[in-house]
Image (cartoon, rainbow, N blue to C red):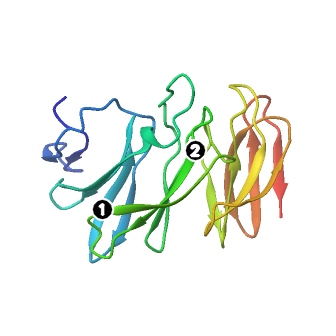
Amino acid sequence: DRTTVVALDKLTGKTVWESASLSDQSAYVSPILVDYASRQMIVGVSGDHIYGVDAKDGSFLWTFTYAEQEPPAGGHNINAASPLYHDGQIYVTSGYNHVGVMLRLSEDGRGVTLAWSDSTLDCHHGGVVRVGNYIYGSNWINNGKGNWCCIDWTTGETRYETDWVSKGSVIYADGMLYCYSERRGHFGLVP
């Protein structure tokens, strides 16, 4: 009720600033730091919102009500995947059949507009990665099952969705996707 984001001094642990409160529940998302429009902003996701906070003073630069974007049946807002950022655009995804969204930052970084949404890559846990013009990750079919997907960064168009063991986590290095199944620990190396 008091704040949404807090900055702490890394040496002393003392509070540097507290943002205003969005009066929202927390989520499981690690925020990201974005350099845009001559400022650093913290981009995060709460239960219902995606937000950008000025890293200098904790003031909100913008908020976007993610919960209103084709909310899933049952109203799940347990967001757990960190946003992706590239070239003035922010992609956010969540499981439970909630759409992913691509937001475009305004020129001054004080607002966002919805560029597109997709219903294929609703990543439950394990995150997503951007490689070139594509976003890779696994989606949510249920808590124990998901497919591995690729969508286009520019349009949100599905490039592929394929079954493999179960959903899981993904990272990218040296031209390869490293996919790790969350159910039984299967590991996949994918060009």
In-front residue for pair 171/166:
166
- Could you classify mark 2 by the number of other residues whose Cα lies within 10 Å: few (under 14), some (14-19), or many (20 or more)? many
Work out whether 112 lies above or below 24: below
- Image quadrant assignment for residue 166: top right
Q: Which residue is mark 2?
A: 99
Q: Which residue is mark 1?
A: 41
Q: CA distance from mark 2 to mark 1?
A: 24 Å
Residue 78 % position (x, y): 49, 30
- Could you classify mark 1 by the number of other residues whose Cα lies within 10 Å: few (under 14), some (14-19), or many (20 or more)? many
In-front residue for pair 91/168:
91
Q: Is residue 150 left or right of residue 4?
A: right
Work out whether 190 lies above or below 179: below
Q: How many marks?
A: 2
Image quarter where the N terminus lies is: top left
Work out whether 43 lies above or below 98: below
Image quarter where the C terminus lies is: bottom right
Q: Which numbered disc, 2 or 1, marks the residue closer to the eye?
A: 2
Residue 160 % position (x, y): 81, 56
Question: Amino acid under label 2?
Answer: Val
Residue at x 18%, y 53% (from the top left corner): 58
N-terminal-most mark, 2 or 1 = 1
Residue at x 75%, y 70% (from the top left corner): 175
Work out whether 34 lies above or below 128: below
Residue at x 34%, y 29% (from the top left corner): 25
In-front residue for pair 4/190:
4
